[in-house]
Every structure is written in C-alpha cells, then in structure tokens.
Image (cartoon, rainbow, N blue to C red):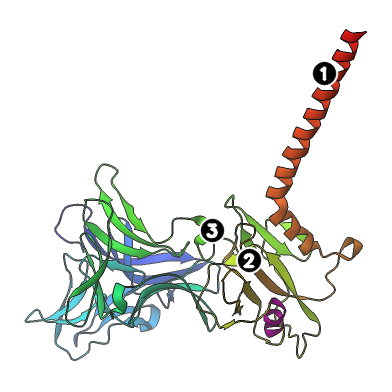
Amino acid sequence: METDQMEPSFRVALSVDAIEGKYSCSLEVFLGDVRVWNSGHYSRFYVSEKCALELTEDGDLRLKGPRGRVGWRTGTSGQGVERLQIQWTGNLVLVDALNRIKWQSFNFPTDVILYGQRLNVATRLTSFPANSTSFYSFQIENDKIALYLNSGTSHYSYWEFKPSKNRNITFIQLGPKGLVLFNDKNKKIAQIPSQVLPPLRFLALGNRTGNLGLYFYSPSKAQFEASFQALNTTCDLPLACKPYGICTFSNACSCIRQDGVGSNCDGGFPRGFCGGKGGNGVEMLELRDVSSVLKDAPRRVNVSKEECGKLCLNDCQCASASFSSAGWDSQVCILYRFVGGLKQVNRGSGMIYMVKVPKGNRGVHGKSNVKKWVLILVGVVDGFIILLVLGGLGYYLVQKRRKNLLDDGSET
C-alpha cells in the first residue's frame, strides 16, 4: 500500500527481517526508504515458514505465524472496522463504514514524529541501540521536553528544552517550520525552529547516537537531511564511548581498564561488588578534569570530595560519582548507578569523576595502572607544552653557545 503523492511517498509493508538466525515479522510504514513506524518496535514477533497479515471478519488486524499463532493485533474486534488505510500524513488507520477512525498508528509512537502528528504530555519516543541493555527516550513533560538515557531503573537526562517564563506544556506538534510546543489553550508557547526553508517531514530519535533531529527532504540530493540536531558535538552524546570509556578532546575514546589502557571498553571493572560500611574491599578512583553529560541523578550540595566518595562507597548501587567545586558558594556531588557519558573537560574546571573499583588494583611502584592512564589523559596537553618549552630552551642555549664560540674565534 502507498499514498498517492509525489516522492517520497508513504508506503505500508509486511516486512520480514533476518535477525541472528531468526525471522522477525512486522507491519511497517516507510517514508521513501526511511522506516517511520513499526509494529514490532517494543516486542519482536519471530516466525518460521510464514507470516501473514489478516483483517478478521469482526475487524481485528493481526500478524499471524504458523499454526495460527498471533504475534501482534490492534484489538479492534467488534468495533465495525471495514478497511485498513494509509493517510497522506503517514498515519496508518483502521476505519469503519462511515470512515471513522477506530485505530491509528499515531496513537502508538515509536522513534519518529511525522509532520502534523501530535504528542501529549507524559508520552515519549524510544530507540534501542544495538548490543546494549540501555535505551534512549524523548519525553514530553509538564515543564520541558528532554532526552534520557535509561539504564536499568535509572534515568539520566542529557539534553532538555524549556519554554520561557516556566510555562507548562500540554502537547507538542511537528509543523513545517519546526517543533511547536502548546499549552492547554492550544496556544503556541515555544518552538524549536528548522534552519532551512523546505518543510519538515519528520522528527527522529536516533537508535545509534541517541541524538534528536528534525529532517527535511532534499530533492537535489534525493535524500533526507537534518535541519536541526539537539547535540552537535560527539562528546556530548550519551554513549559516545562504551561504559568505562572517556571521550577526549580529539573525539577519540580512551578506556579505564584494570589491565591498563586500551581501545576496547568491553571489560570495564567487575560489577556487583559492595563496599559495605566504610567501603571495605573497594575504593574510589579519581579522574580529574572529567565530567559526565548525564544529569538528573541523586545529588548532594555543600559536601567535600571525601564525603562524596564515601557516599558512593557506602551505597551498594552506586557505581560512580561526580564532584564539582566550580561554584562560588557550593560543592556538588552526584551519584550514578552507571559509568558512562564521560568526557574530558578543561584543566582547572574543578570537575572530578570518581569510579568505584576493587582495592588492590596496583601496578609498578604501587601506582594503579588506571591512575597512570589518568595522568596520561589529563597531562597530555601539559606534556606537549613542556616539550615545546624545553625544546625552545635547548635551541636557545645551543644558539647562544654557538654565538659565543664564534665571538671567541673572532677575538682570537
């Protein structure tokens, strides 16, 4: 099925994807070659031999596998459903004989908002990065819209947009010129504008980066391009590096490991340990001039760095802590159950990131391999500067000695 409009048009497809030796069956909506809705977004329906899409006599739309097994359904039995249609907006609908909508894909958002689609407060988009237990979400709240990294029961924001004057949001809608925020009187209170003239076609939450983008279609390039992105710097992405990895000024990832430095962050540190009272068996590893892009975690103010470390050591669920002494009148301690979103910041920032690690991780001369790596990380710029200074001093001394020898020769 497809809409009768200029390319790129909307298409509806029954799709079967091969995933790790299995076959996932789903009903999908495409805009051009971009998938904008998927019935299996939250729960895949795996099949063998065949997959069928069926609209039953009593009006229920179903995906079925072998032996009549139902893997997905609209739940519209007995509501007078007559037809399945795709509207020009990309909304997939079930309608009755009077064309009244009984079910619509717009009520079940996945990771995309289409032009004209409305999302009320307390709803969200989600996307799932490959090979990760964490996932991203774009959430509409009373006072803001925000991006979150969700790990277990913890939710950490990494970008937000608030209307001015503390005005409350009732719903958002994607218009041709931007993402518009409305109040309960259907009045526009804020907008994230598009930065190009062509009308916007969709908003998407990327499953690889977790970035939020507004997209338009470029006829000259025959593809969709972003006119706005929430995050424009690699190191501001929540999972720019794997857990226990730090995004450096060069946008490369360096990893904290027990066996030294490497590019592979898969190992990390053993988890599941608990320091108990006083942190027996564990200690806090300090990473100076390192911070996390993740926010909205439990925090304490007006505590020392030592107290901040003890708070994490005495909490079995705490994996790391961020300490800042940059404020004029306060010191802030943030506790995390997750080690991620780390990035290098300028020297003298007052930022210290502390990671809970097992005691006894010692290398040569009693120094931790990890701590040696931290010195390399935060001292690489200083080392370069010192090298230049020493090189310049040496050059100056050599030239001065040569001049003195030439002067001595002339006098002789």
Left or right relative to 180: residue 342: right
**Residue that lies at the very extreme toward the left in this rendered image:** 98
User: Is residue 267 in view from this perspective?
Assistant: no
Q: Which residues are magenta?
A: 305-312
Mark 3 / mark 1, whichever is N-terminal? 3
In the rendered structure, does residue 306 fall within the stretch colored magenta? yes
> Majority secondary structure of the magenta segment?
helix
| Labels 3, 1: front one | 1
Q: Can you say which quadrant of the picture contains the C terminus? A: top right
**Residue that lies at the very extreme toward the front in this rendered image:** 411
Res. 350 mark: 2
Q: Do residues under tags 3 and 1 come within 8 Å of each other at their CB atoms?
A: no
Classify 383 as above or below 331.
Answer: above
Question: Where's residue 395, x and y in %?
Answer: 78, 29
For image coordinates 82% across by 24% down, the residue present is 400
Residue type at numbered disc 1: Lys
Q: Which residue has dot 3 on it?
A: 235
